[in-house]
Amino acid sequence: MWQEQNNKLVREFQFDDFITAFAFLTKVAILAEKHNHHPEIFNVYNKVKLSLSTHDAGDIVTEKDRKLAAAIDKL
């Protein structure tokens, strides 16, 4: 579940292994390009943390972030 923390939408994901986590990140990267909106990505082995905020709006959460979060949830 996405949570709003410090003017960012944040969600952590956990996978069975590194390769599955990296495959997910590849899908996120392709989706982010389509949305022209790019998350902060943190990955350690099977854990992925994504953070979304809109820099052009002053680093706050906007509808652009919510749309990308919803699209990521569909992966």
Image: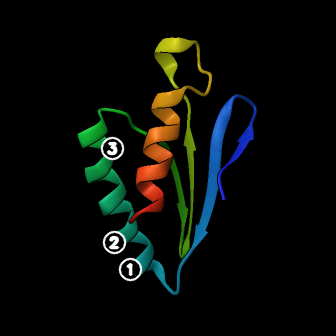
Q: Which mark is residue 4?
A: none
Residue 47 horizontal/vertical position (percent): 58, 69
Of residues 64 and 45, which is closer to you in this image? 64
Q: CA distance from mark 2 to mark 1?
A: 6 Å
Query: What residue is pinned by disc 3?
Result: 32
Q: Secondary structure at mark 3?
A: helix
Label total for image: 3
Local crowd at mark 1 within 10 Å, few (<14), some, or many (≥20)? few
Comparing marks 1 and 3, which lies closer to the viewer?
3
Q: Vertically, is 30 above or below 26?
A: above
Q: Secondary structure at mark 1?
A: helix
- Residue at the (50%, 47%) spot, across then down: 69
The C terminus lies in quadrant = bottom left
Q: Secondary structure at mark 2?
A: helix
Local crowd at mark 2 within 10 Å, few (<14), some, or many (≥20)? few
Query: What residue is pinned by disc 2?
Result: 23
Comparing marks 2 and 3, which lies closer to the viewer?
3
Q: CA distance from mark 1 to mark 3?
A: 20 Å
Q: Earlier in the sequence, mark 1 or mark 3?
A: 1
- Residue at the (47%, 13%) spot, across then down: 56
The amino acid type found where label 2 is placed reads Ala
Local crowd at mark 3 within 10 Å, few (<14), some, or many (≥20)? some
Contact between labelled residues 3 and 1, with CB atoms less than 8 Å apart: no
Residue lying at the far bottom in this picture: please name it. 16
The amino acid type found where label 3 is placed reads Ala
Query: What residue is pinned by disc 1?
Result: 19
